[in-house]
Image (tube, rainbow, N blue to C red):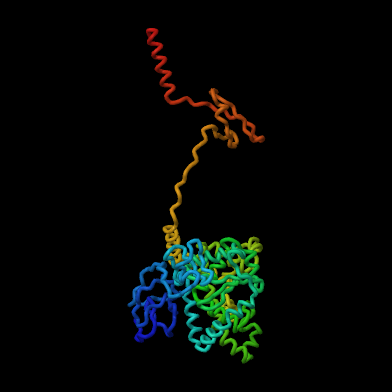
Amino acid sequence: MVAENQNMPVCTNGHQQPVQGSRFCIYCGVGMAAPGGNAQPSPQMPNQPNPGYQAHANVPPPPPQQIYQPVGTQAVFCSTCGGQGQGLPDKLVICKECKWLRPLVPGYQVDTAAFAWAADAKAMNALRRMKPLNAAAKAVSEKVGRRWVEASFNGVLLGEKQMPHIYGQAIRAARILGMSHMPDVFLSGERPWDCLTFGTDKDSFVVVGSALAGNFQGVDMLYLLAREMGHCKAGHALWKTVIRFFLGEQGPAKGFMAGGIFNAILSPTALVGGALEMPLLAWARQAEITADRAGLLTVGSEEVARRVLLSWSLKSSFIYQQINIDSWIEQQMDDDGDMLRLSELTTSSTPYLGPRLKLLTQFAESPELKASLKQIHETIRRAAPPAPPKTEAAPAKDVLRIKCSTCKTPMVVPMAVLAGKPKLSIKCPDQKCGQLTIVTRKAKPAEPKARTAKIREDNASYGE
């Protein structure tokens, strides 16, 4: 059903938004159409619908969209690459000046709707409707936010010469998610078990805790960094900075009811603070689900994502290897009740593990994720240079390669040793075996026929 107010934005599913400036529909999470109610085809892939959402009878669902679109050019000048990497040498992936990031293949781009969680967009719209908070957030973040947060972590800037094994995984994650520019990545010991994203919509950066760098390697580190790149791409950096700048450190027992339920009820200061804190924490929890999905889209394995999230929550990959994972997950699912949701609502900026794993499994089994992974793999495969033809090395003519008839140990016999000998016994070089293998010279195919003809000729000469 098309809304009557034609001046408000409408998504591709026909949902009119209550406010201007939305990037995603607050009801179903898909990209926004042009104002006026004309739902033009969007380059975004339809997002997984919210539980309980019913499609409008008069608005047919949009057809599946390709998530890869040609990268548009912007009028941005860079003295190093000329803007958009036009003058960057092919061997370079990142422009050091403007941070332009070379796509995996020409024209490769992944839309945020391929991994964005619908409730994330809805919660972010609730923050945007708080006009004074929204204005203060942009002003603070753009003027002092990044510099203040960046300095408070006292981090080491990673690069090609500074822990390249971590920085390389960050580049890989950003390119798989189709990011146009590379965020700065810092390593810090101030929050050793955290992986955080800060900055603005135009200038974001990632902070990796030193304990995470020591406990997670390879594809596990790729998943962690892909989560943060998902935050950057989804526009979370601004509000992540706001949470830290206005509310300070967030974590278990640091929320609205951290001082106890009576303090929360009786203290006017707590009530005023809660009015600001509650919507920020509500959005932060939904934003983590979007990040989980971005990581899963990057690594393509629910097993990896689940392993990292469980190890991360224990703050030890070593302990993770010693516990019964199935029993722990069952415990998490049993505790999923009203008290759990109330505790999460009032004390935590991250979703609790049980519900979080449920949502991860739902996304892993969704046709949207499978279609996205298939498109990513096929796009990369088609653009990859053809592999050189395999050439098998010609076998050496001066040696005979055989295996021991008893223990199958490889053996090499010079052909000179076999010269003029119909049979030869070769002893196995393995001292535990030492058995003999008999090598017999094969007769040439034409040789038996020639001998038969010679015998007949001789017999004929004797009158037989």
Q: Nearer the viewer, residue 84 or 296?
A: 84
Q: Most extreme residue toward the bottom, as rendered?
A: 268
Q: Most extreme residue toward the top, as rendered?
A: 463
Q: Nearer the viewer, residue 328 or 122?
A: 122
Q: Position of residue 114 (x, y in %)?
A: 45, 69
Q: Is residue 253 visible?
A: yes
Q: Nearer the viewer, residue 227 or 398?
A: 398
Q: Nearer the viewer, residue 169 or 35?
A: 169
Q: How many marks?
A: 0
In the picture, residue 457 is in which quadrant? top left
Figure check: 390 above or below 147: above
Q: Quadrant of the N terminus?
A: bottom left
In the picture, residue 322 is in which quadrant? bottom right
Figure check: 436 above or below 84: above
Q: Is residue 360 visible?
A: no
Q: Position of residue 387 (x, y in %)?
A: 45, 51
Q: Residue at x 59, y 63 (%)?
A: 164
Q: Is residue 25 toward the left or the right of residue 199 in the image? A: left
Q: Is residue 150 toward the left or the right of residue 203 in the image? A: right
Q: Position of residue 64 (x, y in %)?
A: 38, 68
Q: Position of residue 395 (x, y in %)?
A: 51, 37
Q: Quadrant of the C terminus?
A: top left
Q: Is residue 62 toward the left or the right of residue 317 in the image? A: left
Q: Most extreme residue toward the front, as rendered?
A: 79
